Amino acid sequence: MNDKTVAKTTRVDAVVIGAGIAGLYQVYRLREQGFDVQAFEAGSNVGGTWYWNRYPGARFDSTAEVYQFWFSEDLYKGWKPSERFPAQPESERWLNYVADRCDLRKHYRFSTRVEAAHYDEAAQSWSITTDQGDTVQARFLITCCGMLSAPLTSVFPGQDSFKGQLFHTARWPKEPVDFTGKRVGIVGTGATGIQVIQTIASQVGHLKVFLRTPQYTIPMNNPKYTEAVWAGFSSRFHEMKERVQRTFAGHVYDFGGYGTWAERTPEERIAVLEELWNDGSLALWLASFSEMFFDEKVNAEVSEFVRGKMRERLKDPVLCEKLIPTNYGFGTNRVPLDTNYLEAYHRPNVEIVDVKASPIECVTPEGVRTADGKLHELDILILATGFDAGTGALTRIDIRGRGGRSLKDDWGREIRTTMGLQVHGYPNLFTTGAPLAPSAAFCNMTTCLQQQVDWITECLVALRRKGLTVIEPSRALEDEWVAHHDETSNATLLVKTDSWYMGTNVKGKQRRMLSYIGGVGKYRQRCEELAAGGYPGFEMR
């Protein structure tokens, strides 16, 4: 299918891009509703983020019992995770299990990258072309490309000259990498960098961590799951399915369970923070006191609590100074879970290179040169340098809407969507994991992506029932959502912190909160209201 000599033009109801959580479910739902669907995936197999991100130590930080599909109780019960936070190989196997059980592969062309999608106004359809020479005409285009799937790989001058091995964590090879005795450097200490560092520190000869921004980090509590434990979760399938749809971040835990900060005594507050710290999940961040996102005094106290825990682990005052954040508050940036990450810096073979004090100037054939003139000689260089989050996966495709307008150009001026589901000017284009929805960052991804897929599918069914073929959000509706999104974001402390949440990791990118932060439950309610009301504000014909 992927040989250009057999490329052909086909016509379908819908094209789906991506074979991760959203893509697989979207194909399932469309097929279930009788739509003819063709799906494309750049990778050679299903898995999405769990296909591409196979770097050492990769694992998710949503608990296994809720990082699940909810459309089939039998599917849920038939898969038995080995631990609370499974590692990448198990997550990849799980998605293969889903694809096999639901017979989804036959709808995909793998190792095929969508290069362009142009809307034909006269035909009221999308023309999609691939790097394999395929052309597909589709009434609807649904992008399930992932919110973190456009890696920032070309970061430093001279990368191509490096004589050693250079890897980006989001494009890690399937073959094992031998670190034994090697001089290894890693750039980036976000959630991914932390997982790599804690995993390879004991394997390498010497590890240089090029550190710019330290992170608040919580020790992961990752017990094994026995069959009995999973049977307990399975018995609560329907309860959890309903619960995650209405919480703030799509997990079973939520804010409100401990009352407000103001009504608690100082001793009670600490007891709550201790309890959630010991839980070893994201609950301290997403289910303790929501005031930490709005009130600087509350955030300062929670931040100091976490700093104290990190000091206990690090002990060394020099390491504390380098590795404990002081210039931004806890929870205003992505909070990683770790397994002996801080302790890795106690090893004699692990060294911090402070690139805030002396930035990286370039990569040379021998290693990395910093602004102080020092050459850090390396055998392996790892880039955990993040992504063009939310927007990059779509702007790297030549998407053109009405009048030939370019999504890349439009988002280059201003990042706008209608609830992260559609974009004004691009009829019949649907998006998941796109900006201005919780699924862009602030959600247990399986919860939010399934919700978006369900809304999209039901929208297409409603359109078909009315005998209509085109739907596009009005400018007024999009303006209304963007204004609400910004008002909600600007009321929080998150907008004051530079992070990929705000797009500040990409030069020239608009500074706007990428994810809707009003909560999963509130977002879902608004989506449901639009559907129940017959999609007011959407232009249908």
Image: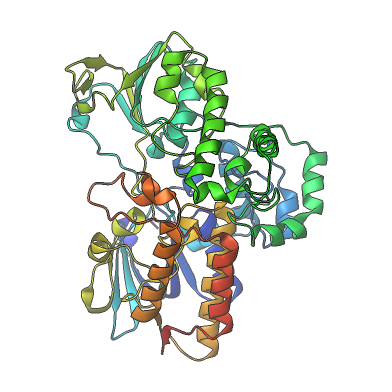
| Residue 309 visible (yes or no) | yes
Horizontal placement of 354 versus 160: left or right?
right
Residue at the location (31% across, 22% down)? 354
Name the image colouring. rainbow
Residue 318 or residue 336, whichever sits in front: 318
- Residue 375, compared with residue 478, is above or below; it is above
Total numbered circles: 0
Horizontal placement of 506 versus 46: left or right?
left
Q: Quadrant of the C terminus?
A: bottom left
Q: Quadrant of the N terminus?
A: bottom left
Horizontal placement of 308 versus 380: left or right?
right
- Residue 227, compared with residue 364, is above or below; it is below
Residue 422 at what x, y percent from top left? 41, 71
| Residue 18 visible (yes or no) | no
Residue at the location (56% across, 85% down)? 533
Residue 290 or residue 297, whichever sits in front: 297
Residue 37 at what x, y percent from top left? 48, 70
Residue 386 at what x, y percent from top left? 37, 40
Q: Quadrant of residue 197?
A: top left
- Residue 510, compared with residue 91, is above or below; it is below
Residue 87 at what x, y percent from top left? 58, 35
Residue 455 or residue 135, whichever sits in front: 455
Residue at the location (70% across, 59% down)? 243
